[in-house]
């Protein structure tokens, strides 16, 4: 699994010109799933994300996690994170998991974050044509790949 985490002041998902979900301060998380991802990836990523110290403390140092700030979280599926770009100019998405694999893993990922954070996680709609808006705070953007744990 690969995630792009952005510290945001606000973020939202619009589908067919209708606001679907929005958050205030917190994290916007884009998640891509590969065919060989499994529940261990979810557990590791959820823990990493929830404990990631990317929020400022009272001294303006990034020393607080989402757990400590009570920030909100918006998760959006994004298969294009799995793009291969080595050959040619058209990205290949062969590494992205098919929906029968990725949908259950995506849902488990959201549930895992909810359990760890003890709060509702806002989401996009898997497979929908979404317009994602956000105001990146900092800017702070972190990319984590569960295949690169060591």
Image (cartoon, helix red, strand yellow):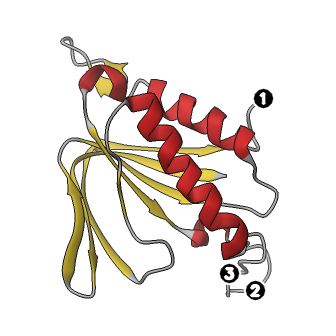
Q: Under tag 1, what secondary structure?
A: loop
Tag 1 residue: 150
- Name the residue located 30 percent from the left edge and 27 percent from the top edge: 55
Mark 1–mark 2 contact, CB under 8 Å? Answer: no
Q: Residue at x 66, y 74 (%)?
A: 99
Lower sequence index among marks 3 and 1:
3
Nearer-the-camera pick, 69 or 90: 69
Q: Is residue 103 left or right of residue 120?
A: right
Q: Earlier in the sequence, mark 1 or mark 2?
A: 2
Q: Secondary structure at mark 3?
A: loop
Q: Nearer the viewer, mark 3 or mark 2?
A: 3
Front residue of 2/121: it is 121
Residue 9: x and y in percent read: 19, 46
Of helix, strand and loop, which one carries label 2?
A: loop
Q: As drawn, is 11 to the left or to the right of 109?
A: left
Q: What is the C-alpha distance between the residues marked 1 and 2?
A: 31 Å
Quadrant assignment, res 7: top left
Q: Which residue is mark 3?
A: 91
Q: Residue at x 30, y 17 (%)?
A: 61
Q: Are marks 3 and 2 in contact (CB under 8 Å)?
A: no
The residue to which callout 2 is attached is: 88
Query: Going by the image, does 35 lie left or right of 67?
Result: right
């Amino acid at each position: 699994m690969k995630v792009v985490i952005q510290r945001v002041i606000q973020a939202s998902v619009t589908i067919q010109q209708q606001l679907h979900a929005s958050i205030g301060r917190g994290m916007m998380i884009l998640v891509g799933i590969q065919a060989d991802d499994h529940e261990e990836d979810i557990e590791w990523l959820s823990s990493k994300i929830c404990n990631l110290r990317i929020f400022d403390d009272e001294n303006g140092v990034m020393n607080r996690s989402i757990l400590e700030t009570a920030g909100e979280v918006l998760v959006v599926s994004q298969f294009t994170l799995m793009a291969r770009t080595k050959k040619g100019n058209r990205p290949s998405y062969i590494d992205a998991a098919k929906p029968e694999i990725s949908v259950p893993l995506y849902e488990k990922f959201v549930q895992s974050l909810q359990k760890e954070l003890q709060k509702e996680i806002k989401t996009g709609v898997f497979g929908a044509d979404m317009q994602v808006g956000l105001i990146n705070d900092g800017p702070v953007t972190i990319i984590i790949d569960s295949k690169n744990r060591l």
